[in-house]
Amino acid sequence: MNKVILMGRLTRDPEVRYSQGEQSTAVARYTLAVDRRFVRNNGGDQQTADFINCVSFGRTAEFAEKYYHKGIKIAISGRIQTGSYTNREGQKVYTTEVVVEEQEFAESKNANSDHFGGGGYSAPAERPSPSAAGDGFMNIPDGIDEELPFN
């Protein structure tokens, strides 16, 4: 079984390209900084990070392009994929990356504003609150449609 689950912060904005051909497909690449704790010989708890290359395709890539940015904390699941290519100098280069199958936000919009110099989201001032419609659904006030990821 080849299954990976990671949670970390994006080290940069996703890089998105589109494949060529009749039905072009979005391909998003980004790197996740994933915390790793380990114990030193002196018994002290140290923390470092692993930087994991990730790639997503299609709608998953388009979602990453639209909503993900440097510093945001996300959780992903997918599979590890290895490969190799020969670079311009004729040397064989081996690659390892996670092919993202599912992804989601791992914190609220406001929680991210404390990280990476406050470059995260901020809540808009005076937002109208949703009201119950009586049929079990909530009415969404006008003007916030653009913030919903499922328009």
Image: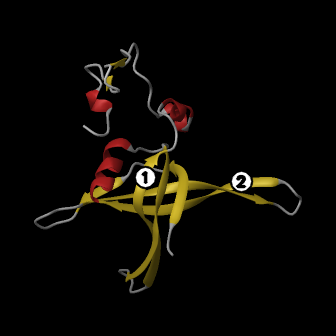
Disc 1 to disc 2, C-alpha distance: 25 Å
Residue 145 or 124: which is nearer the viewer?
145
Coordinates of residue 76 in the picture (x, y in percent)? 47, 55
Residue positioned 54% across, 57% down in the render: 6
Residue 76 or 40: which is nearer the viewer?
76
SS class, disc 2:
strand
Q: Callout 1: few (<14), some (14-19), or many (20+) C-alpha neighbours within 10 Å?
A: some
Q: Which residue is mark 2?
A: 47
Coordinates of residue 60 in the picture (x, y in percent)? 33, 54
Q: Which mark is residue 145?
A: none
In the figure, 1 relative to 51: above or below? below
Give the colour scheme shown: secondary structure
Coordinates of residue 50 in the picture (x, y in percent)? 59, 60
Residue positioned 29% across, 19% down in the render: 141
SS class, disc 1:
strand
Residue 9 or 139: which is nearer the viewer?
139
The type of residue carrying mark 1 is Gln
The type of residue carrying mark 2 is Gln
Coordinates of residue 27 in the picture (x, y in percent)? 30, 60
